[in-house]
């Protein structure tokens, strides 16, 4: 992915900055875990949350990138995790995705809401999701 900084252009208020920093700190720890554990933790975190609307997920992404230079740069895993966690702190959950593409090879992590990537470049659609934590459990599976 490109190294374009994504700060959203506005500085959130103090309360929003505190919750966004909390989400970023948790995401940095979570990003160190193996993929299986990340999926398990996120699966537990999403419980009881309603599906995120696109504008809600975009606001969370902008808040995360406004408080973290790590997340506003090329580090998509902590950014996507922090965005999902901040959404959850606000009572909703996007679909968290991690995927790959083969030509040119690349890996990426992002969130989706209302069926589309949130705040991501158009080439995000070229990635094939490998791990996802949807905003609702798969049919036939328990919460």
Image (cartoon, grey):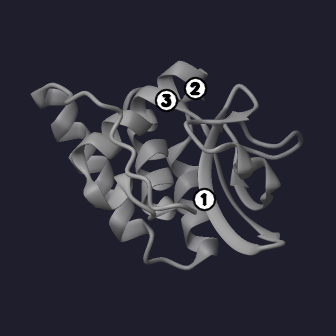
Measure the alpha-carbon separation of dots 1 and 2: 17 Å
Q: Position of residue 7 (x, y in %)?
A: 33, 41
**In this view of the protein, which residue sits in the foreground, 7 or 4?**
4
- Mark 3 falls on what kind of element? helix
Q: Mark 3 or mark 1: which comes first in sequence?
A: 3
User: Residues at badges 3 and 1 in contact (C-beta under 8 Å)?
Assistant: no
**In this view of the protein, which residue sits in the foreground, 33 or 71?**
71
- Mark 2 falls on what kind of element? loop
Q: Position of residue 9 (x, y in %)?
A: 29, 31
- From this view, report whether residue 48 is shown above or below residue 29: above
Mark identifier at residue 58? 3
Residue 134 in the figure: left or right of residue 46: right
Residue 69 in the figure: left or right of residue 113: left
The residue at which mark 2 appears reads as 52
The residue at which mark 1 appears reads as 109
Q: Mark 1 or mark 2: which comes first in sequence?
A: 2
Q: Within 10 Å of the Cα at label 3, are there few (<14), some (14-19), or many (20+) other Cα atoms?
A: many
Between label 1 and label 2, give the one nearer the viewer. 1
Measure the alpha-carbon separation of dots 3 and 1: 15 Å
Identify which residue is drawn at 75% across, 45% down: 142
The quadrant the N terminus occupies is: bottom right
Q: Position of residue 37 (x, y in %)?
A: 56, 71
The quadrant the C terminus occupies is: top right
Q: Mark 3 or mark 2: which comes first in sequence?
A: 2
- From this view, report whether residue 67 is shown above or below residue 60: below
Q: In this figure, what is the number of numbered marks?
A: 3
**In this view of the protein, which residue sits in the foreground, 100 or 103?**
103
Q: Name the residue at the left extreme.
A: 14
Q: Within 10 Å of the Cα at label 1, are there few (<14), some (14-19), or many (20+) other Cα atoms?
A: many
Mark identifier at residue 82? none
Residue 124 in the figure: left or right of residue 43: right
Identify which residue is drawn at 27% across, 56% down: 69
């Amino acid at each position: 992915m490109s190294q374009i900084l994504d700060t959203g252009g506005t500085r959130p208020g103090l309360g929003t900055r505190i919750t966004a920093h909390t989400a970023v700190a948790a995401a940095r720890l979570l990003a160190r875990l193996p993929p299986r554990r990340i999926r398990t933790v996120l699966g537990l975190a999403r419980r009881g949350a309603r599906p995120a609307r696109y504008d809600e997920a975009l606001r969370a992404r902008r808040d995360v990138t406004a408080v973290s230079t790590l997340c506003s740069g090329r580090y998509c895993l902590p950014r996507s995790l922090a965005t999902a966690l901040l959404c959850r702190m606000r009572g909703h959950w996007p679909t968290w995705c991690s995927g790959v593409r083969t030509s040119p090879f690349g890996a990426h992590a992002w969130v989706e809401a209302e069926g589309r990537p949130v705040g991501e470049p158009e080439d995000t659609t070229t990635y094939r999701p490998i791990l996802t934590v949807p905003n609702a459990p798969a049919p036939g599976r328990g919460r």
